[in-house]
Image: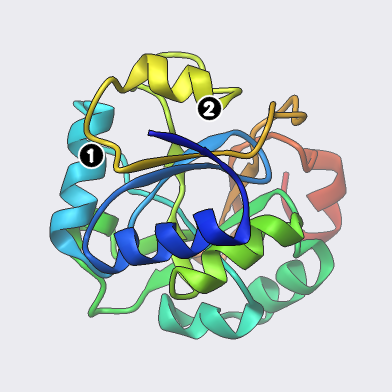
Amino acid sequence: MIQRDSQETQARAAIIISQGGVIAFRTDTFYGLGADPLNQDAIRKVSELKGRGDAKPILLLISDLRELDRFISEQSKSFISIAERFWPGPLTLIGIARAELPIELTLGTQTIGVRLPADENVRALVRVCGGGLTATSANISGQPPALSAKDVEHYFAQGIDLIIDGGEVTATQPSTVLDLSKPEPRLIREGAVSRGELKEFGVR
């Protein structure tokens, strides 16, 4: 079911998330699949929807910087400096995951990717849904990212409890993904934040 984004729709989304359901919503980049990151069954639903045969860890969006401690156990000076420089923004940072996070989320990597989006409305949705949401792209694995609510509906005829229509995606690139779980930073994916912008932090 597609519903236009509104406070009422976001309130409904929060109920669905609290009950272990799955929503689709426009993130600060492309449309994503949202579920409670601490609910193992909900995360399994997301993975089944995606058809993730390649089994990749699922990244998260947080509503506020204070939520970071719920998911990242160790924050190096480099992690803090880069977060302060680029957040809110389209940069996903990978850090050491808290031990209590579901293995379905980390897939045994002991790490987790987290992003604080720049879009205030996206942060508001994540906030009413508990402060953290999964945000893996709302498409079948291997297919192009969903640019609209209709694209999401096309990919998933069933299995999603609510598709929030936040309008057409304006982003042209995915988020940049930077692994800070080890002493040396490693650029996993160059996206909206360029390699050059990260050079001062030791990214080659």
Left or right of residue 187: residue 86: right
Left or right of residue 38: residue 73: right
Which residue is at the far front? 8
Indicate the position of residue 108 as horizontal and vertical percent values. Answer: 20, 58
**73 in relation to 83, above or below:** below
Left or right of residue 115: residue 78: right
The Cα atoms of the two marked residues, 2 and 1, are separated by 19 Å
Left or right of residue 90: residue 37: left
Residue in the foreground of this view, choosing between 84 and 164:
164
Indicate the position of residue 35 as horizontal and vertical percent values. Answer: 34, 55
The mark that comes first in sequence, 2 or 1, is 1
Identify the residue shown where x is 61% and y is 46%. 5
Looking at the rendered structure, the kind of residue marked 1 is Ser
Q: Identify the disc placed on residue 148.
A: none
Residue with the mark numbered 1: 47
**78 in relation to 201, above or below:** below
The quadrant of the picture occupied by the C terminus is top right
The reply to whether residue 145 is visible in this rendering is no
The quadrant of the picture occupied by the N terminus is top left
- Provide the secondary structure element on which disc 1 rests: helix
- Provide the secondary structure element on which disc 2 rests: helix
Identify the residue shown where x is 80% and y is 39%. 194
Residue in the foreground of this view, choosing between 19 and 30:
19
Residue in the foreground of this view, choosing between 136 and 20:
20
Identify the residue shown where x is 53% and y is 81%. 67
Q: Residues within 10 Å of mark 2 (few under 14, many from 20)?
A: many
- Which quadrant of the view contains residue 99? bottom left
The reply to whether residue 184 is visible in this rendering is yes
Residue with the mark numbered 2: 149
Identify the residue shown where x is 64% and y is 79%. 65
Looking at the rendered structure, the kind of residue marked 2 is Ala
